[in-house]
Amino acid sequence: MIRRAFSVAVYPRHEGRVLLIRHRRLGLWLPPGGEMLPDETPLEAAARELREETGLVGRFPVVSDVDGTPPGFIGYEEHPAGSKGIHLNFVFVADVDTDEVHPNDEFEEWRWVAHFDDVGGPPNVAQLGRIALAARPRG
């Protein structure tokens, strides 16, 4: 049986750019994120992972007109996560007030990007990054 784990990814957004981190173990450019804890909603996990990994506090804008959709939710994707099985990944955008990152031990390189031509991560990192940059708050 393949293990399945719920996870989140967060695209912190500041002044027309989003933050990507170079994940130490995987060697890939990815948004901050990780597995949800058993008692968390996806939105709670996104806020926690953003704060734990980067020191940033995000505001999650309402970007969907669909009733019941959590603020900041921009997509869902699944991906293999090595020995962790399959990650069922909820993806969010969060607006942050600063670009000052305080990294945890999962990464030591980061960059704020506005274009995804040569990001070097999985294709969905660029696809979702573009959606994060284009997402506008709903009235």
Image: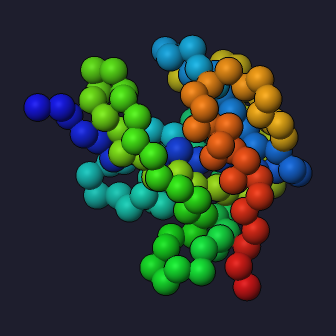
Q: Quadrant of residue 129?
A: top right
For residue 97, above or below residue 30: below
Residue 14, horizontal then vertical, whole percent: 82, 50
Q: Is residue 130 left or right of residue 26?
A: right
Q: Quadrant of residue 60?
A: bottom right
For residue 56, above or below residue 22: below
Q: Is residue 41 left or right of residue 25?
A: left
Q: What residue is shown at x 53% (from left), y 56% (from top)?
A: 75
Q: Which quarter of the rendering shows the N terminus?
A: top left
Image mark count: 0
Of residue 69 and residue 78, the one placed in the foreground of this image is 78
Q: Which quarter of the rendering shows the C terminus?
A: bottom right
Residue 17, horizontal then vertical, whole percent: 82, 44
Q: What residue is shown at x 60% (from left), y 63% (from top)?
A: 72
Of residue 127 and residue 11, the one placed in the foreground of this image is 127
Q: What residue is shown at x 49% (from left), y 15% (from top)?
A: 25
Residue 104 can be seen, yes or no: no
Residue 134, horizontal then vertical, whole percent: 77, 58
Residue 44 can be seen, yes or no: yes
Q: Quadrant of residue 118?
A: top right
Which residue appears farthest toward the right when viewing the image? 15
Q: Is residue 29 left or right of residue 13?
A: left
